[in-house]
Image (cartoon, helix red, strand yellow):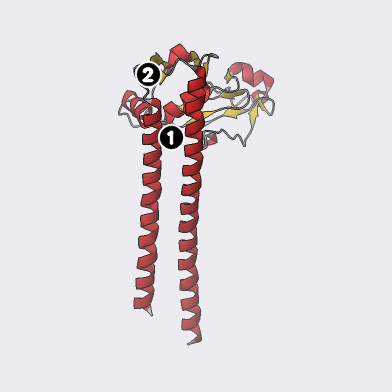
Amino acid sequence: IVAKLDAVFTEIDREVQNTNEIINLSNTNLKKIIDDKTKGNDNWIEFKVKDLGIVKTGNTPKSSEKENYGSEIPFVKPPHFNSDGSITITDVGLSKKGSKLSRSAPANSVLMVCIGATIGKVGINNIDVCFNQQINSVTSSDKFDPELIYWQMRGKRFQNDVIQNAGQATLPIINKSKWQNLSIFLPESLNEQIEIRTLLRKINTETENFINNKLQKIQNLNALKTAILKKALLQSEAA
Protein backbone atom coordinates (compact mmCIF):
# COMPACT_ATOMS: atom_id res chain seq x y z
CA ILE A 1 0.00 0.00 0.00
CA VAL A 2 2.82 2.39 0.90
CA ALA A 3 4.56 1.74 -2.41
CA LYS A 4 1.36 2.41 -4.35
CA LEU A 5 0.74 5.62 -2.42
CA ASP A 6 4.29 6.79 -3.05
CA ALA A 7 3.87 6.18 -6.79
CA VAL A 8 0.56 8.07 -6.94
CA PHE A 9 1.82 10.97 -4.82
CA THR A 10 4.97 11.24 -6.91
CA GLU A 11 2.85 11.57 -10.05
CA ILE A 12 0.62 14.19 -8.42
CA ASP A 13 3.65 16.17 -7.18
CA ARG A 14 5.16 16.03 -10.66
CA GLU A 15 1.95 17.40 -12.18
CA VAL A 16 1.83 20.18 -9.56
CA GLN A 17 5.42 21.13 -10.37
CA ASN A 18 4.73 21.14 -14.12
CA THR A 19 1.68 23.33 -13.59
CA ASN A 20 3.67 25.80 -11.47
CA GLU A 21 6.27 26.00 -14.24
CA ILE A 22 3.51 26.78 -16.75
CA ILE A 23 2.25 29.57 -14.47
CA ASN A 24 5.76 31.06 -14.16
CA LEU A 25 6.23 30.86 -17.92
CA SER A 26 2.89 32.59 -18.49
CA ASN A 27 3.90 35.47 -16.21
CA THR A 28 7.27 35.77 -17.97
CA ASN A 29 5.64 35.75 -21.41
CA LEU A 30 3.18 38.43 -20.32
CA LYS A 31 6.05 40.73 -19.31
CA LYS A 32 7.72 40.09 -22.67
CA ILE A 33 4.50 40.93 -24.51
CA ILE A 34 4.14 44.15 -22.51
CA ASP A 35 7.71 45.14 -23.40
CA ASP A 36 7.16 44.25 -27.05
CA LYS A 37 3.97 46.31 -27.30
CA THR A 38 5.41 49.32 -25.46
CA LYS A 39 8.93 49.54 -26.89
CA GLY A 40 7.53 51.59 -29.77
CA ASN A 41 9.40 52.74 -32.84
CA ASP A 42 11.25 55.79 -34.07
CA ASN A 43 8.04 57.85 -33.88
CA TRP A 44 7.63 57.23 -30.15
CA ILE A 45 8.96 59.78 -27.67
CA GLU A 46 11.13 59.05 -24.65
CA PHE A 47 9.93 60.75 -21.49
CA LYS A 48 11.15 60.76 -17.93
CA VAL A 49 8.45 59.89 -15.39
CA LYS A 50 8.62 63.48 -14.12
CA ASP A 51 7.80 64.73 -17.66
CA LEU A 52 4.43 62.96 -17.57
CA GLY A 53 2.89 64.97 -14.74
CA ILE A 54 3.06 65.45 -10.97
CA VAL A 55 5.28 63.02 -9.00
CA LYS A 56 4.88 62.48 -5.26
CA THR A 57 6.16 60.26 -2.46
CA GLY A 58 3.57 59.30 0.14
CA ASN A 59 3.58 59.96 3.85
CA THR A 60 2.02 58.34 6.94
CA PRO A 61 0.39 60.51 9.62
CA LYS A 62 1.32 59.69 13.23
CA SER A 63 -0.53 56.55 14.26
CA SER A 64 -0.34 57.66 17.90
CA GLU A 65 -2.79 60.44 17.07
CA LYS A 66 -6.03 58.49 16.61
CA GLU A 67 -7.86 61.48 15.14
CA ASN A 68 -5.69 61.14 12.01
CA TYR A 69 -7.48 57.92 11.07
CA GLY A 70 -11.03 57.21 9.95
CA SER A 71 -13.04 56.37 6.87
CA GLU A 72 -13.10 59.66 4.98
CA ILE A 73 -10.03 59.14 2.75
CA PRO A 74 -8.71 55.72 1.56
CA PHE A 75 -5.07 55.16 2.54
CA VAL A 76 -3.03 52.98 0.17
CA LYS A 77 -0.26 50.65 1.40
CA PRO A 78 1.76 47.95 -0.46
CA PRO A 79 -0.59 45.02 0.42
CA HIS A 80 -3.46 46.79 -1.37
CA PHE A 81 -2.01 46.28 -4.88
CA ASN A 82 -3.63 43.53 -7.00
CA SER A 83 -2.10 41.60 -9.89
CA ASP A 84 -4.54 43.13 -12.40
CA GLY A 85 -3.46 46.70 -11.59
CA SER A 86 -6.40 47.51 -9.36
CA ILE A 87 -6.01 48.72 -5.78
CA THR A 88 -8.27 47.33 -3.06
CA ILE A 89 -8.27 49.01 0.35
CA THR A 90 -9.81 46.89 3.07
CA ASP A 91 -8.57 48.49 6.28
CA VAL A 92 -8.82 51.83 8.04
CA GLY A 93 -8.29 55.01 6.03
CA LEU A 94 -7.59 58.57 7.08
CA SER A 95 -9.72 61.32 8.53
CA LYS A 96 -9.82 64.70 6.83
CA LYS A 97 -7.25 65.90 9.34
CA GLY A 98 -5.01 62.90 8.66
CA SER A 99 -5.23 63.37 4.90
CA LYS A 100 -3.71 66.83 5.28
CA LEU A 101 -0.70 65.22 6.95
CA SER A 102 -0.29 62.62 4.18
CA ARG A 103 -0.03 63.06 0.41
CA SER A 104 -2.84 62.52 -2.03
CA ALA A 105 -3.20 61.16 -5.55
CA PRO A 106 -6.31 61.94 -7.59
CA ALA A 107 -8.13 59.15 -9.42
CA ASN A 108 -6.26 57.61 -12.38
CA SER A 109 -2.82 58.18 -10.93
CA VAL A 110 -0.20 55.46 -11.27
CA LEU A 111 1.26 54.27 -7.95
CA MET A 112 4.29 52.04 -7.41
CA VAL A 113 5.80 50.41 -4.34
CA CYS A 114 9.39 51.67 -4.21
CA ILE A 115 10.81 49.98 -1.11
CA GLY A 116 11.01 46.52 0.41
CA ALA A 117 10.22 42.99 -0.69
CA THR A 118 7.35 44.04 -2.97
CA ILE A 119 9.26 46.81 -4.75
CA GLY A 120 7.92 47.27 -8.28
CA LYS A 121 4.26 46.48 -7.53
CA VAL A 122 2.23 48.97 -9.52
CA GLY A 123 -1.43 49.93 -9.83
CA ILE A 124 -3.95 52.62 -10.75
CA ASN A 125 -6.38 54.13 -8.27
CA ASN A 126 -9.97 54.61 -9.45
CA ILE A 127 -10.77 57.10 -6.67
CA ASP A 128 -8.87 59.86 -4.88
CA VAL A 129 -6.53 58.36 -2.25
CA CYS A 130 -3.69 59.10 0.12
CA PHE A 131 -0.70 56.76 0.30
CA ASN A 132 2.24 55.92 2.54
CA GLN A 133 5.97 56.63 2.25
CA GLN A 134 6.72 53.28 0.59
CA ILE A 135 4.90 54.41 -2.54
CA ASN A 136 5.61 56.91 -5.32
CA SER A 137 2.90 58.22 -7.63
CA VAL A 138 2.64 60.02 -10.94
CA THR A 139 -0.50 61.88 -11.96
CA SER A 140 -0.19 62.37 -15.69
CA SER A 141 -1.43 65.26 -17.78
CA ASP A 142 -4.31 64.71 -20.21
CA LYS A 143 -1.80 64.19 -23.05
CA PHE A 144 -0.97 60.75 -21.68
CA ASP A 145 -3.06 57.67 -21.02
CA PRO A 146 -2.36 56.61 -17.41
CA GLU A 147 -3.17 52.96 -18.08
CA LEU A 148 -0.50 52.71 -20.79
CA ILE A 149 1.99 54.24 -18.34
CA TYR A 150 0.92 51.55 -15.87
CA TRP A 151 1.45 48.77 -18.41
CA GLN A 152 4.92 50.01 -19.32
CA MET A 153 5.85 50.18 -15.64
CA ARG A 154 4.73 46.55 -15.31
CA GLY A 155 7.00 45.46 -18.14
CA LYS A 156 10.33 43.75 -17.64
CA ARG A 157 12.40 46.72 -18.87
CA PHE A 158 10.98 49.23 -16.39
CA GLN A 159 10.95 46.70 -13.56
CA ASN A 160 14.65 45.98 -14.21
CA ASP A 161 15.38 49.72 -14.18
CA VAL A 162 13.68 49.99 -10.79
CA ILE A 163 15.71 47.12 -9.33
CA GLN A 164 19.00 48.38 -10.78
CA ASN A 165 18.43 51.83 -9.29
CA ALA A 166 17.31 50.44 -5.94
CA GLY A 167 20.81 49.34 -4.98
CA GLN A 168 21.88 46.10 -3.33
CA ALA A 169 21.00 46.92 0.28
CA THR A 170 19.14 44.44 2.49
CA LEU A 171 16.06 46.64 2.07
CA PRO A 172 15.91 47.66 -1.61
CA ILE A 173 14.71 51.22 -2.15
CA ILE A 174 14.46 53.58 -5.09
CA ASN A 175 13.92 57.17 -4.00
CA LYS A 176 11.71 59.72 -5.73
CA SER A 177 14.66 61.42 -7.42
CA LYS A 178 15.80 58.23 -9.17
CA TRP A 179 12.29 56.94 -9.87
CA GLN A 180 11.09 60.11 -11.55
CA ASN A 181 14.10 60.02 -13.89
CA LEU A 182 13.37 56.54 -15.28
CA SER A 183 12.35 56.39 -18.92
CA ILE A 184 8.85 55.86 -20.34
CA PHE A 185 8.27 55.53 -24.10
CA LEU A 186 4.94 56.67 -25.54
CA PRO A 187 3.43 57.47 -28.93
CA GLU A 188 2.45 61.11 -29.38
CA SER A 189 -1.11 60.22 -30.38
CA LEU A 190 -3.46 59.72 -27.42
CA ASN A 191 -5.70 57.52 -29.58
CA GLU A 192 -2.76 55.23 -30.30
CA GLN A 193 -1.93 55.09 -26.60
CA ILE A 194 -5.51 54.05 -25.82
CA GLU A 195 -5.50 51.43 -28.59
CA ILE A 196 -2.32 49.81 -27.23
CA ARG A 197 -3.45 49.76 -23.60
CA THR A 198 -6.80 48.26 -24.62
CA LEU A 199 -4.96 45.41 -26.32
CA LEU A 200 -2.69 44.90 -23.30
CA ARG A 201 -5.68 44.83 -20.96
CA LYS A 202 -7.26 42.09 -23.10
CA ILE A 203 -4.05 40.03 -23.15
CA ASN A 204 -3.64 40.43 -19.39
CA THR A 205 -7.22 39.30 -18.73
CA GLU A 206 -6.71 36.21 -20.87
CA THR A 207 -3.44 35.44 -19.07
CA GLU A 208 -5.00 35.95 -15.63
CA ASN A 209 -7.88 33.60 -16.52
CA PHE A 210 -5.43 30.98 -17.77
CA ILE A 211 -3.32 31.23 -14.61
CA ASN A 212 -6.39 31.06 -12.37
CA ASN A 213 -7.43 27.85 -14.12
CA LYS A 214 -3.98 26.39 -13.48
CA LEU A 215 -4.11 27.45 -9.83
CA GLN A 216 -7.46 25.70 -9.53
CA LYS A 217 -5.87 22.60 -11.04
CA ILE A 218 -3.16 22.66 -8.36
CA GLN A 219 -5.78 23.05 -5.67
CA ASN A 220 -7.70 20.07 -7.08
CA LEU A 221 -4.55 17.95 -7.23
CA ASN A 222 -3.70 18.71 -3.61
CA ALA A 223 -7.27 17.90 -2.61
CA LEU A 224 -7.02 14.60 -4.49
CA LYS A 225 -3.82 13.77 -2.65
CA THR A 226 -5.50 14.42 0.69
CA ALA A 227 -8.55 12.34 -0.27
CA ILE A 228 -6.42 9.38 -1.39
CA LEU A 229 -4.43 9.45 1.85
CA LYS A 230 -7.60 9.66 3.94
CA LYS A 231 -9.16 6.72 2.09
CA ALA A 232 -6.01 4.65 2.48
CA LEU A 233 -5.95 5.32 6.24
CA LEU A 234 -9.61 4.30 6.58
CA GLN A 235 -8.99 1.07 4.66
CA SER A 236 -5.96 0.36 6.81
CA GLU A 237 -7.95 0.87 10.00
CA ALA A 238 -10.76 -1.36 8.71
CA ALA A 239 -8.32 -4.14 7.94
Q: Is residue 85 in view?
A: yes
Residue at 50 percent across and 64 percent down: it is: 223
Q: Quadrant of residue 157?
A: top left
Nearer to me, 210 or 20: 210
First reached walking from the N terminus: tag 2 or tag 1: 1
Q: Which residue is mark 2?
A: 183
Reply above or below: 83 against 106.
below
Return the x and y of residue 166 as percentages of the image width and height: 35, 25
Return the x and y of residue 202 as percentages of the image width and height: 51, 37
The N terminus appears in which quarter of the rendering?
Answer: bottom left
Reply above or below: 53 against 134.
above
Q: Amino acid at mark 1?
A: Thr
Q: Is residue 111 in view?
A: no
Q: Secondary structure at mark 2?
A: strand
Count of marks placed on residues: 2
Left or right placement of residue 96 versus residue 114 in this view: right
Q: Report the disc number at residue 143.
A: none
Residue at 40 percent across and 38 percent down: it is: 30
Nearer to me, 1 or 151: 151
Return the x and y of residue 101 as percentages of the image width and height: 60, 17
Residue at 39 percent across and 15 percent down: it is: 45
Nearer to me, 216 or 5: 216
Reply above or below: 192 against 212.
above
Q: Residues within 10 Å of mark 1 (few under 14, many from 20)?
A: some
Left or right placement of residue 126 versus residue 143 in this view: right
Return the x and y of residue 183 as percentages of the image width and height: 37, 18
Q: Amino acid at mark 2?
A: Ser
Q: Which residue is mark 1?
A: 118
Q: Secondary structure at mark 1?
A: loop
Tell me the distance, in whole angstroms, between the alpha carbons under discs 2 and 1: 21 Å
Residue at 56 percent across and 33 percent down: it is: 87
Do the residues under discs 2 and 1 have CB atoms within 8 angstroms?
Answer: no
